[in-house]
Image (spheres, rainbow, N blue to C red):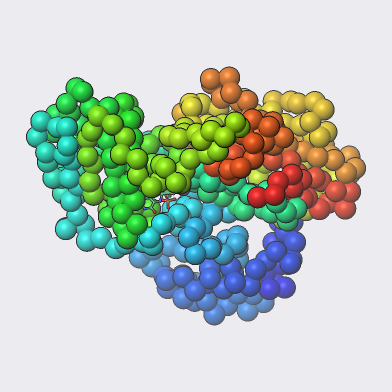
Amino acid sequence: MNNQGKILDSNSIKIRRRTLLGGAAAAAIAVVQTTFGKAMQKVVTQQELGDPTKKQGPPPGIIGTRSPFEKLGKLPSDTSSRTPLQDLFGTITPSDLHYERHHGGVPLIDPEKYELLIHGMVRKPMIFRLKDLKRFPSMSRTMFLECSGNYRGSKHTLSPQEICGLTSQSEWTGVMLSTLFREVGIDPKATWFLAEGADAAVMTRSIPIQKGWDDTMVAYAQNGEAIRPEQGYPARLVLPGWEGNTCVKWIRRIEVSDKPFMTREETSKYTEPVKGGKIRQFSFVMDARSIITYPAYPAMVEKGWIEIRGIAWSGRGKVVKVEISTNAGKTWQAALLQTPVLDKAHTGFRFLWNWNGQTTEIMSRAIDETGYIQPFYKDLLNARGGKSGYHFNPITKWVVQKNGDVYLNAESKK
Ligand SMILES: Nc1nc2c(c(=O)[nH]1)N[C@H]1C(S)=C(S)[C@@H](COP(=O)(O)O)O[C@H]1N2
Ligand SMILES: [Mo]
């Protein structure tokens, strides 16, 4: 690993050696498949590689590969993997780094056998094959997908991936659900629909019919190619700005109704205890959030100019402002937003900071077009009573220490 450390050290962004995980690096090398990738499996040090101008490289393959020198953050758990936000640039998440959350594993579905049934309070129940879905007018939209359980904050040594890596952004392509609604003829008295997945969890969620009419997409493509099995191949729902759990993958059935179905995912799970012994249910929309992804643990910094970078997003619309504090929240200044700023999408921000080398705390807060301001941890806790981790979007505070180490100000027990 020493060599990898050296190569990364030569970049302006320094990475601590101890965070270069043997496991993650080995995994990165194990998955490469092209001719280039196969060649790269054997040679992973610059010394072994030799002078690249003196030797013909391997020919092209069917699919490209990622440089084995690029690390891919932490290894996944049994039920989820997280996007390594601190290692990425721009706002599109490479498809193979999209976070994954499965309740019953990843089913493999033959696209020739795939069927989507829409029935219930409709004039004409219908079954759509994948090729039927693809014949309808298509739509592409770049937006984020985020799990409502996207929060951790209990240790100083957490990276953006670990704190909130259950959010990813893709350009999704598919057919609008409203198009299919018109085909089947929705009963005007219908108020909800059930979305059901074809995985071992048979994931089901009740969704207000209006969201179906507004902007719900039955997506079959992601970032220019067919959706990956992990993301719901061959088709899934994408509900812009709404919690990931409603975006049912491997979608096989939609039942139109005049009441919610009260499934497990909206009664025992995905509900939040709030103050006064009450439970918040059907909390669909993802609140505005931001995180500084550089400098952030495990990066190290040097005195002088630092470009603070990060992403901000809101399930309620566009991010209109991101404010940065470099003095522990005493004063705030506006960051530059990367245009175009898209609706319900990760938005890049940056802020030039001349660090004087003294220990301080840096943080960002997102403000969306509804005027919502991302809250401090203590305010969220006060409002919610702290019994639930769902929809927890506090300001992330990074402590920048004199020696250049960056640590999370871990305010939470979760
Ligand atoms: N059929 C089905 N759909 C599902 C899930 C699932 O387990 N089964 N997980 C949900 C949850 S909790 C989230 S956060 C998102 C995750 O989508 P991703 O794995 O593509 O990131 O899918 C949702 N849709
Ligand atoms: Mo989720």
Residue 339, image quadrant:
top right
Can see residue 363? yes
Quarter holding the N terminus?
bottom right
Residue 288 place in picture, x, y as percent = 56, 31
Q: Nearer the viewer, residue 337 or 360?
A: 360
Residue at the front extreme of this rendering: 277
Q: Quadrant of residue 170?
A: top left
The residue that appears at 55% across and 38% down in the rendered structure is 273
Evaluate whether residue 52 shows in this view.
no
Q: Residue at x 64, y 30 (%)?
A: 383
Is 57 in front, or is 103?
103
Residue 411, percent across and down? Answer: 74, 44
Residue at the image position 50 percent from the left and 34 percent from the top: 280
Q: Is residue 239 above or below residue 294?
A: above
Reply above or below: 191 against 76.
above
The image position of residue 143, as x and y in percent, is 44, 37
Rendered residue at 74%/47% (across/down): 410
Provide residue 252's location: percent of width, then percent of height: 23, 49
